[in-house]
Image (spheres, rainbow, N blue to C red):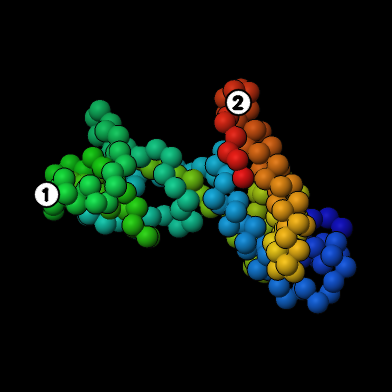
Amino acid sequence: MSLDTYANLQTAVATWFKRADLNSSIPDGIALAEAKMNRYLRTKDMVTQNTNFSITGEYVAVPTNFGGVKTFYLNTNPTQTLEYMADEEMTSVFQGNTGIPGFYNVQGANFRFGAVPDATYSATLAYWLKVPALSASNTSNWVLTSHPDAYLYGTMGEMCGFLRDFEGAQAWETQMYRVMDEIAGISAKDQWGGVSMSVRVA
């Protein structure tokens, strides 16, 4: 069976386990595998850019499916990079002062800017997208299309954990992280012509 859709992935996991009684829990396993992907992967397929991000106040909502900032700068002449500053430090340094923002952090579903913007500023935001979650209405995504083994191994690992088979869970998770390292390596080669990236330890 081809691992090309959400439904086929669920069927494959059930088939590999030879356990029909797991069917209702497999979607949870898929979601947990996606959570690991989102914590670990940072690849070219996950980058998007908004060249006219509007900074309208101290707090501005992050984009939908936001997974983290790659680059962030004001569209001034010359451009001005927005640097990350921890929330406690931002409160201490700016204390509500207004001006041209030079710093940001993320609070939940919002960016926070310091100084508090004294006008609306246009910025360019390049950011990481989360892996689009699979569902009955979103039946595939770039990971499942190009790297179905990451989904299969990750879900198998989560389901082994569900069954308290911790040795099996570790074995499958190791396979998943091996595939994700390979995905990262392909991305690095495409972006930097083969310059190697440091590999995070799972």
Task: Residue type at mark 2: give it.
Answer: Ser
User: Residue beneath label 1, please?
Assistant: 97
In the image: residue 14, left or right of residue 98: right
Say whether residue 123 is left or right of residue 195. left
| Residue kind at label 1, given as amino acid type | Asn
Question: Is residue 126 depicted above or below 88 in this figure?
Answer: above
Q: To which quarter of the image does residue 8 belong?
A: bottom right
Mark 2 / mark 1, whichever is N-terminal: 1
Residue 36 x %, y % = 60, 54
Tell me where residue 60 appears, x and y as whole percent: 30, 56
How far apart, in angstroms, are the residues tagged by discs 2 and 1?
Answer: 43 Å
Secondary element at image label 1 = loop
Residue at 76 percent of width and 57 percent of height: 167
Front residue (pair 170, 24): 170
Can residue 33 be spotted in the picture? yes
* Residue at 22 percent of width and 48 percent of height: 90
- Indicate the quadrant containing the N terminus: top left, top right, bottom left or bottom right: bottom right
Out of 14 and 45, give the one closest to the viewer: 14
**Quadrant (top left, top right, bottom left, bottom right) of the C terminus:** top right
Give the image location of residue 140, x and y in percent.
Answer: 68, 57
Provide residue 86's location: percent of width, then percent of height. 29, 47
Using the rendered image of the protein, determine whether residue 55 is visible from the camera's viewpoint: no
Q: Residue at x 16, y 45 (%)?
A: 93
Q: Name the residue tied to disc 2.
A: 196
Q: Report helix, strand or loop for mark 2.
A: loop
Q: Residue at x 22, y 54 (%)?
A: 58
Quadrant of the image occupied by residue 59 = bottom left
